[in-house]
Image: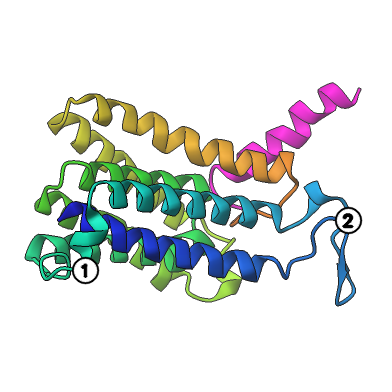
Amino acid sequence: MLRARDFWGALVLICCAVFFLWRTSFIPFLGENRAGVSGAEWYNSAAIVPFGIWLAMLLLGLVLLRISIKAGGAERAFSGAGLGWNRQEAIRIRAIAVIMSVFIFALIPRVDFILSSGLVITALIYGFHAGHTKRMLMVAVVVALPGLYALIMHFPQAEWNKPHDDDWVVLAAWVLLTVWMLARDRSRIARATPWVAVLTPLILVTAMAFGFRQNVPNRGGLLFSQIEYHYYVNLRPLWRK
């Protein structure tokens, strides 16, 4: 049954990746000039990060599709069992949909990228790696509540980069979820989750901002604003001398 789900999931990933790669191709790249906008050097192009993300998603979809087909997932996917539905599957899909919707539409525009990504990564790993329904529902609520707070308190775009109260709410939710996870799950995955949740967005956002010189979401966020300040004031002058 799981391989049948993997088959359908892989097809969705591939279709989404191909669509967004096509849309990203409209961004100037390799020194192109479109509608008066120059792509300059390739490493300064705004297309480089989206291309990397969607190429990685395409590769993930292809790998998942290959594994599913080899395990008989394609044959089962087109059978009655593969097209079936059950309660746990419905909860899993809905919980993921809630988390990703809140992340994309509420947290990313308004909350520090490192904080919002860390909360979501922790929620996805803890909530779904063991397949426990109660965990799925709990992490969906933990992500949704601070997301709704940010959405309601700072809905207009003019409010997105101003206060940090929503950053503190997300940080508190992240810390509480991490403490709860470590208190109840001492597995290797649980112990590694805080490191993954911190380092992944930290490396990504610093590489985007200072390596590829890309715009990043919410530059005035609680953590990134401090990172940017110390980079330009304390670190960059060291090697510019």
**Element carrying mark 2:** loop
Q: Nearer the viewer, mark 1 or mark 2?
A: 1
Q: Quadrant of residue 190?
A: top left
Separation of residues labelled 1 and 2 (CA atoms): 48 Å
Is 240 a magenta residue?
A: yes
Q: Is residue 5 visible?
A: no
| SS assignment at label 1 | loop
Most common secondary structure along the magenta stretch: helix
Tell me residue 171's x, y (percent). Answer: 39, 45
Say few, some or many: other residues with alpha carbon within 10 Å of mark 2 (under 14 / 14 to 19 / 20 or more): some
Front position in the image: 186 or 171 = 186
Image x and y of residue 51, in percent:
64, 55
Tag shown at residue 148: none
Residue 22 in the image: x percent, y percent? 63, 69
Q: Is residue 216 left or right of residue 77?
A: right
Q: Is residue 233 above or below residue 79?
A: above
Looking at the rendered image, the quarter that the C terminus falls into is: top right
Which mark sits nearer the N-terminus, 1 or 2?
2
Q: Which residue is mark 1?
A: 78
The magenta segment? 220-241
Q: Callout 1 environment at 10 Å: few (<14), some (14 to 19), or many (20+)?
A: few
Q: Name the residue located 44 percent from the left edge and 35 percent from the top edge.
A: 198
Q: Is residue 118 visible?
A: yes
| Residue kind at label 1, given as amino acid type | Phe
Name the residue nearer the viewer: 75 or 157.
75
Q: Mark 2 highlights which residue? A: 40
